[in-house]
């Protein structure tokens, strides 16, 4: 059996059911931004106070949020429950209001967004329900003009991928639902998930070009990413149980090759649909998700080698359900260590590192959308209440503002048929 190809979910191979599955990484950019150095004036109280702020002009789910250099927040695309959206809105923290801004040329959901060094915003890939396909296309937003212009096409039509801005300003897009063949000019590819390893590529804003880089070792979707202090990128919390990989943009000391991926030590809890945040000391907090357990059909050995090979005899992996486990991954030692568990289980939660180094965990489901939030204090390894959201949300978007407050918006309120109703309500959490 191939490494970690255990009970793997094949999400994304049918269009129009995106919001019935568990999550797009709508908040991945906001989570990365939470690792920036921010004013220490945000305070260090044990809880947050949640208050209503301006509502979106368009209710949306599976959108992306990007904190601009001005301190405003750009919200792009998503779905209204019936179609994918091309519209975009700006949130002004000073007025607490959302204002429509220039629209994308192509409607899309499950796309990725990244802030570029010059302050522009790159939006790439995703799924366009009007086209009925995933997209290679990219668009770049200029905050100074409030308009979009066409960017260069990617080599693969990534949807529900991981995104990370490297220290040198390049943007990594990795994995997701994608075609396993290079781009054919003028053709939008459909379905066909990769058979071995998700493709990844780099956008260089200085040359306005995409370059294919090393393939991931596993095919995975709904990924999250964290940029580590040494410039490498940890990617995980997708559909593949226990699949965490590290991308190294630098040269491998043995081969001299650049852009290689390496599997981390195996996550002992085989989690999927979890959340992760970079801690101040460079380690990574991984929380919640679906816990999977290995059920052998006969006694056997379970081993991992530095090359990334996992040896398992017969048996299968089964989903246990919502998980309270919280673990810390040390990228230097390549080890996993459990820390205090979450007070309540959460599937598909969202985590944001606060300005004082604590980690806020919100969202997720456990039979119902949770309004409760939790705060993890790294210095004590303990959890405290983060206060209650005003609205329970599935797949909300959370952005750490320059004030140290947390903006939560969008997401969905599930209905009996699981398709749900996108939300326009927004709220602010003040530490």
Image: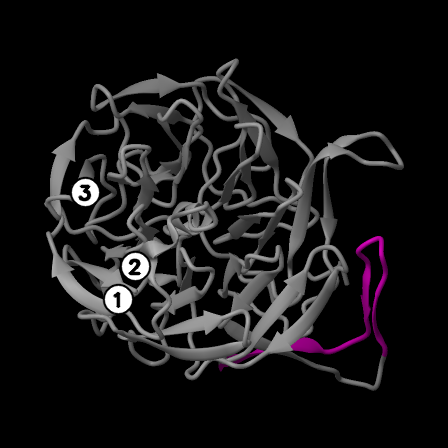
Label 1 – label 3 distance at C-alpha: 19 Å
Residue pointed to by mark 2 = 396
Quarter of the image where one finds residue 200:
top right
**Which quadrant: the N terminus?**
bottom right
> What SS does tag 3 mark?
strand
Q: Please check the rendered image and state whether residue 245 is part of the magenta-colored stretch, yes or no.
A: no
Are the residues tagged 1 and 2 within 8 Å (C-beta)? yes
Residue pointed to by mark 3 = 91
368 sits left or right of 219 in the view = left
Residue pointed to by mark 1 = 393
Residue 251's x, y, as percent? 78, 32
Q: Residue at x 29, y 74 (%)?
A: 369
Instruction: Tell me the mark number nearer the camera, choosing from 1 and 3.
Output: 3
Residue 15's x, y, as percent? 36, 48
- Image: magenta residue range: 301-321
Instruction: Decide which of tag 2 and tag 3 comes sooner along the chain.
Output: 3
Label 1 – label 2 distance at C-alpha: 6 Å
């Amino acid at each position: 059996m191939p490494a970690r190809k255990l009970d793997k979910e094949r999400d994304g191979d049918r269009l129009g059911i995106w919001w019935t599955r568990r999550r797009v990484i709508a908040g991945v950019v906001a989570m990365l931004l939470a690792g920036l150095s921010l004013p220490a004036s945000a305070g260090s109280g044990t809880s947050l106070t949640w208050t209503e702020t301006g509502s979106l002009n368009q209710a949306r789910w599976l959108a992306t949020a990007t904190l601009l250099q001005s301190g405003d927040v750009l919200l792009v695309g998503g779905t209204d429950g019936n179609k994918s959206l091309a519209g975009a809105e700006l949130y002004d923290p000073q007025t607490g209001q959302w204002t429509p801004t220039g629209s994308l040329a192509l409607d899309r959901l499950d796309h990725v967004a990244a802030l570029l060094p010059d302050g522009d915003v790159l939006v790439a890939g995703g799924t366009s329900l009007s086209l009925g396909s995933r997209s290679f296309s990219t668009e770049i937003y200029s905050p100074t003009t409030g308009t979009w212009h066409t960017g260069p096409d990617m080599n693969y039509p990534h949807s529900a991928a991981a995104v990370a801005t490297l220290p040198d300003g390049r943007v990594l897009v990795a994995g997701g639902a994608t075609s396993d063949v290079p781009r054919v000019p003028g053709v939008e590819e459909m379905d066909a998930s990769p058979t071995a390893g998700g493709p990844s590529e780099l956008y260089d804003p200085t040359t306005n070009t995409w370059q294919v880089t090393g393939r991931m070792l596993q095919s995975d979707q709904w990924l999250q990413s964290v940029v580590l202090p040494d410039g490498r990128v940890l990617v995980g919390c997708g559909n593949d149980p226990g699949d965490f990989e590290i991308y190294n943009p630098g040269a491998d000391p043995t081969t001299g090759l650049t852009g290689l991926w390496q599997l981390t030590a195996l996550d002992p809890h085989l989690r999927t649909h979890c959340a992760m945040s970079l801690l101040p000391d460079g380690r990574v907090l991984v929380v919640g998700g679906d816990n999977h357990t290995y059920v052998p059909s006969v006694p056997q050995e379970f081993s991992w080698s530095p090359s990334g090979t996992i040896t398992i005899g017969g048996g299968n992996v089964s989903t246990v359900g919502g998980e309270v486990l919280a673990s810390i991954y040390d990228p230097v030692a390549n080890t996993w260590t459990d820390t205090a568990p979450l007070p309540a289980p959460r599937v598909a939660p969202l985590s944001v590192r606060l300005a004082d180094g604590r980690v806020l965990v919100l969202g997720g489901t456990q039979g119902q959308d949770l309004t409760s939030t939790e705060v993890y204090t790294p210095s004590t390894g303990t959890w405290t209440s983060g206060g209650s959201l005003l609205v329970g949300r599935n797949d909300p978007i959370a952005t750490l503002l320059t004030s140290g407050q947390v903006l939560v918006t969008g997401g969905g309120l599930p209905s009996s048929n699981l398709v749900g109703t996108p939300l326009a309500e927004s709220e602010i959490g003040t530490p």
